[in-house]
Image (cartoon, rainbow, N blue to C red):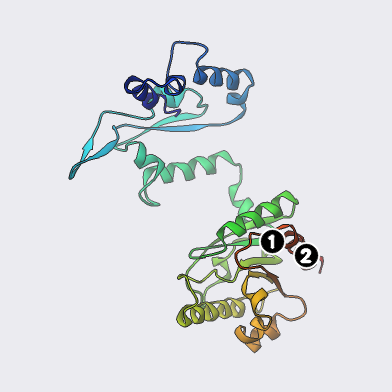
Amino acid sequence: MNGAGIANLGSGIFASKTLWQLGESDDPDSFLDTLRDEWIDEGMVARIPTECGYETVGVTVPFLWWEVRTGVTVVTPDSASTLCTTGVTGLAQLDHFGIVKPANFEAQPYGLAVRWYQELFDDPEEKITSGDVVVANCEVDRYGKLLFDKLAKLLYDNSISMRVSLRLPQDWSTDTPNSSIWTGTEPRLLVIHYSCFQDEDGVDDDVLEERRVDFNELFASLANTDVKILICSRAFWDYPTFVQENITRANREAFKDGRLLMLPLRHGVSIGPDDIKRFERLVDQALAN
């Protein structure tokens, strides 16, 4: 788990004290041994359930036109088991890179990580089926990912009951069920970036029209619920009449009386204290009614 084997290999090639400190050593004062002892002495190993995996074949490296399999393993069974408390699994026919970067969702490392997570929490389903605020997790959002990580953390830090949505697809239609956004109880507020369905960069007319259509379809599919929508976008700052020009009259009528809230953001400027205050006020406003 600690990768000391590769550090040992490197220290044999390069005269590096740093690599020696990170490798497996008989010296009790080496960095890795000292760190491991501190974790054990503090009781961290006993308090943190830990599942570990290790590779069963050596890493592959490029050589001219070929991929050459070496005998070098980054994480050995002994290294993986050092601080693991619940189990150690050797992953068949996978090298280090195949574990840390699974090829797809069907790959063994991904499946193991999901199973370990589900076993770790008593009721993981409850954590995603309730919460007043749902923060949209968009498949193709070009601009809002980092912003929404910050907003989700802000909600969590303020002890607001929240959850992250299921992964919203690239295209939306009124036939898409609301269960594609959340499972369990209906939230009171959906927080979403206006680029959620924008799968290309730029301001090409076709791209903007696709975004406009998808968003209006989302509004229509939520019109008969009690869910409020808070949209974040830089477009609101640059175009004060954006809503009137891009959201249909029927959707504006369905989301009147405080069901539609907007957080305008500035182009090229990271979210700042004033934006955070506006966001907090809008969330409070949505949850107060």
Which residue position holds label 2? Answer: 287
Secondary structure state at the residue bearing disc 1:
strand
Quadrant assignment, res 215: bottom right
Task: State the residue position of label 1.
Answer: 133
Corner quadrant of residue 258: bottom right
Query: Identity of the amino acid at label 1?
Result: Val
* 87 to the left or right of 103: right
Distance from Cα at disc 1 to Cα at disc 2: 9 Å
Q: Residue furthest bottom?
A: 249
Quadrant of the rendered image containing residue 91:
top left
Residue depicted at x 18% and y 42% = 64
Q: Position of residue 50 (x, y in %)?
A: 53, 31
Q: Relative to residue 240, is residue 180 depicted above or below? A: above
* Residue 154 x, y percent position in the rendering: 70, 53
Q: Is residue 225 left or right of residue 9?
A: right
The image position of residue 134, as x and y in percent, is 65, 61
Looking at the picture, which amino acid does disc 2 mark? Leu
Are discs 1 and 2 less than 8 Å apart at CB?
Answer: yes
Q: Position of residue 55 (x, y in %)?
A: 35, 33
Of 210 and 111, the residue lying toward us: 210
Question: In this rendering, is residue 189 above or below 164?
Answer: below
Identity of the residue drawn at 26% across and 38% down: 61
